[in-house]
Every structure is written in structure tokens, then in C-alpha cells.
Image (spheres, rainbow, N blue to C red):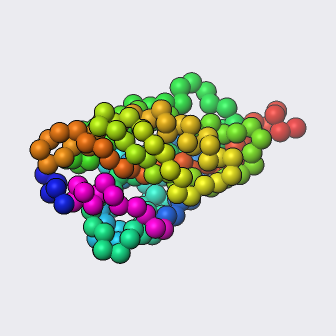
Amino acid sequence: MIPTAALLVWALMEATTVVGPAYPPDAVAGGMVVAVLHVSAGAVSKISIQQGDAPFVEPAKAALARWRFSPGESSDTLVVIVFRAPTLFSVGSSSRSLDDKNALPGLAYPRRVTDPAYPPNSLAEGSVVLRLELSETGAVSNVKPVQGLGNLTPSCVAAVRSWQFAPAHNKKGSASKAYVYAVCVFRRPVLPPHLSE
């Protein structure tokens, strides 16, 4: 059970420094990592991977270890990282359902995540970091860009607005509002040989 004071800090905690993970050069498909940052005195003291696809876990951990929060803040923060497949168009569904069996007590946890689209007029690659406000039902009620990346930012914002979470709970077990972080990692799409000629 998370103490009430920790829940209050967790709900108000904002990152002051964020670092987007590198896209693994050997990855041919997309993936996802769900992590909980254990923050002590504003620094990440431990990273718990709740769910993660290879080869994305190590780059995610390396980047998240460099995140910083306001000095004196200590609590747990959920971060969902989506590594978008390096294709121009999605084949099949770009949404996936997650099992919340690994969720930490009290924290929100993603149930359904949609990959962002890659804007056809873009050549950018890198990371977009967003702070999401969740309602008591686990719906995304507000999105605040923390680190943008040109026209990839609106694509990431549009995707996360459809994400669904198991709601956070307070000490009494009642569903409560929460804040989580979403990171969308883009790699410039690789065109099939017959399209690049």
C-alpha cells in the first residue's frame, strides 16, 4: 500500500530533465516498455520494468536513468515507452492490449496502447515525451508536451489520447486521478526497395 503522502507527491511530481531512448539499430519491428521510476530526492534511484520487448528494454533503462525531477521529490512514476515500427504505413492493428498483472499497487497501468502514425511529410526521428493526466476512470484527460519533436509531436498526442489505463487508487482503495509519462520513439521509416527507386 502506498502512503497518502507518497500519493500526493506522485500526483504532483514533474520531470525537470527527460531523455528519450535511442532506437536500437537492429530492431526491425516496433516494441514497448512499461517502467516504474522510483524517484528519491529528485533522482531516479531504481527502474522497475513491468513489461518490455527485446531489444528495447536496455535503451529505455539507459535513458530513464538520466531523468530528473524537482529536488526533494520522492515517489514512483509510471512511464510507457512506445517504439514505433520503422515503416511508413502500419499493417494490421496499431493497438495492443496489455495485462495489468505486473502493476504496482496504487499506480495506474496501461490497458490499451495505440502506436502513433508517422506523418508522411516528415523526415524526423527521435523522441516525444508527454505528461498525461488520467481521470478516475483511467482515461487520458489532459496531455502536456514535455519534449516535442516538430510534426511528430501532434502524432504522438493524437495516439496517447486514445490510450486506456487501469486507474490509480488512493490509500482507501478508491480510484483517483494520476499523472504518467508517455514516450513515443520514432525512427525514420525504411522504404521497401521497390518504393525507394
Q: In which quarter of the image is residue 196?
A: top right
- Looking at the image, the residue that sits furthest to the top is 92
Q: Where is residue 81 in the image (x, y as percent from the top left)?
A: 46, 49
Above or below residue 76? Residue 190 is above
Q: Is residue 33 visible?
A: no
Q: Where is residue 68 in the image (x, y as percent from the top left)?
A: 42, 69
In the rendered image, the quadrant that contains the C terminus is: top right
How many dots with numbers? 0
Q: Nearer the viewer, residue 8 or 24?
A: 8
- Looking at the image, the residue that sits furthest to the right is 197
Q: In which quarter of the image is residue 192?
A: top right
Above or below residue 61? Residue 173 is above
Q: Can residue 74 be seen in this view?
A: yes
Q: Nearer the viewer, residue 16 or 195?
A: 16
At x 74%, y 37%, the residue is: 120
At x 66%, y 39%, the residue is: 118
At x 48%, y 68%, the residue is: 17
* In the image: residue 152, left or right of residue 75: right
Q: Position of residue 173 (x, y in %)?
A: 14, 41
At x 32%, y 47%, the residue is: 178
Report if residue 83 lies within the magenta region. no
* In the image: residue 21, left or right of residue 78: right
Q: Where is residue 91 in the image (x, y as percent from the top left)?
A: 61, 27
Q: Nearer the viewer, residue 132 or 80?
A: 132
| Magenta span | 6-17
